[in-house]
Image: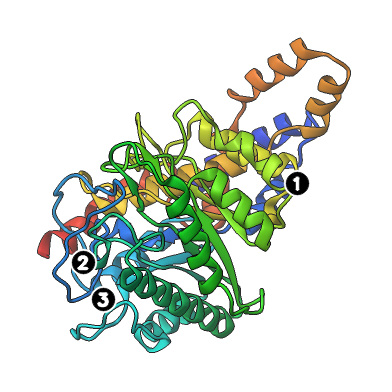
Amino acid sequence: MKNNKLIEQAYDLAKEQYASLGVDTDAALRKMKEVIISLQCWQTDDVGGFETRDAELAGGGIQATGNYPGKATSLDEMRQDLEKVMSLLPGKQRLNLHAIYGDFQGKKIDRDQIEIKHFQSWVDWCKIQGIGMDFNATLFSHPRAASGYTLSSKNEGDRAFWVEHLKRCRAISADIGKQLGTPCVHNTWIPDGSKDTPVDRNGHRTILKQSLDEAIAVKYPKDHMKDAVESKLFGIGIESMTVGSHEFYLGYAIKNNILVCLDNGHFHPTEQVGDKISSVLLFLDEILLHITRPVRWDSDHVVTLNEDVQLIASEVIRNNFLNRVNIGLDFFDASINRIGAYVVGTRATQKAFLYALLEPIPLLKSYEEAGKNFERLALLEELKTKLFGAVWNYYCLQEDVPVGEDYITEVQQYEKDVLSKR
């Protein structure tokens, strides 16, 4: 059980410690209200969705591993789980929904036929929760994706099908943003690629450009929806060529003034997404982040507070990019309690941004500009053992959510009362 007095006392000590470096911890906590994270709905059910369909999850290297009991099997269960997750997180977050999670009422609605009515119950739920919502076209787990190509397919029937799906998803996103009064980020990722070395890379990429041009031809107000496109280095079954490469989408985003999505699992393991942010934002108004934890490849492990995630958060905060960056999560772990996975991963991301807000940025920059590289390195190292945990605990106390490891027992109780009975 939390001891409020001890938490407050520890915070006072931390506040004094950070103040000696010119950091206002109260201001940092107020700034955390602007760190809004879009929670990926697919963690609750291992990217299954609620369509009536024959195809299983496949394509582009997507794979949820594990069979831990208690996954959501209906919209009601998914919403119940999301509400529990949000009750354990400080601050207000957002919902990130894939098109396969529509309220289809048991009817077989193909993806070129979806409409806002199939997602209205989600919009209504978000209104009740007081949160915004983001959306994604689902271009996998479908018979028309079985060839390995969707928007870049040389089969005109398949290509046209996916263009129509994308058009409808954008219209739905615009309606969502209009109803909720906050822009809906619509993200496009495709699984298209080749297992072995292709000859006609250019042909598929030319078709992809044509498809995207057709799909985004209708323009919507930016206060209703924002377009994003997401690259990937490779996936299982498309190891030799990914049509939607980083170079392709970065060029497309810049040319069309839309967002590029930087997923830190979608690059070579030695690349850091944090290093890309300042470069990309010199040429784009905004970006979308998908924060995950790759282990050797795009394995979508639960986010932890590691150096890669910390660099992403620090680059955003050091450069005052928070209002130009849309933060989302993209991991799905079926090997552990799914609610616990959500809470650990989201809190780790929040911690990274709070840590970044507590950096003495002017002092660090002054060292750097004066060529005092030893002093810069020493201070960055010393920050790692400052009383950051005390500030985080106080933030949780302020937000009336479990402090420290207290959320573990909350998750265990929810598993006992709810998940174990599914």
* Number of the front mark, 1 or 2: 2
Q: Which residue is mark 2?
A: 143
Total label count? 3
| Whether residue 40 is visible | yes
Q: Which residue is mark 1?
A: 282
Disc 2 element: helix
Which residue is rendered at x = 76% and y = 37% of the image?
Answer: 23
* Number of the front mark, 1 or 3: 1
CA gap between label 1 and label 2 equals: 40 Å
CA gap between label 1 and label 3 equals: 43 Å
Farthest-out residue, left: 421
Disc 3 element: helix
Which residue is rendered at x = 73% and y = 39% of the image?
Answer: 318
Kind of residue at badge 1 = Leu
Residue 377 is tagged as none
Q: Which residue is mark 3?
A: 76
Kind of residue at badge 3 = Asp
**Looking at the image, is mark 1 or mark 2 earlier in the sequence?**
2
Q: How is the image coloured?
A: rainbow
Label 2 CA crowd tier, 10 Å (few <14, some 14–19, many 20+): few
Q: Return the x and y of residue 297 as percentages of the image width and height.
A: 35, 34
On the rendered structure, is 407 left or right of 175? left
* Number of the front mark, 2 or 3: 2
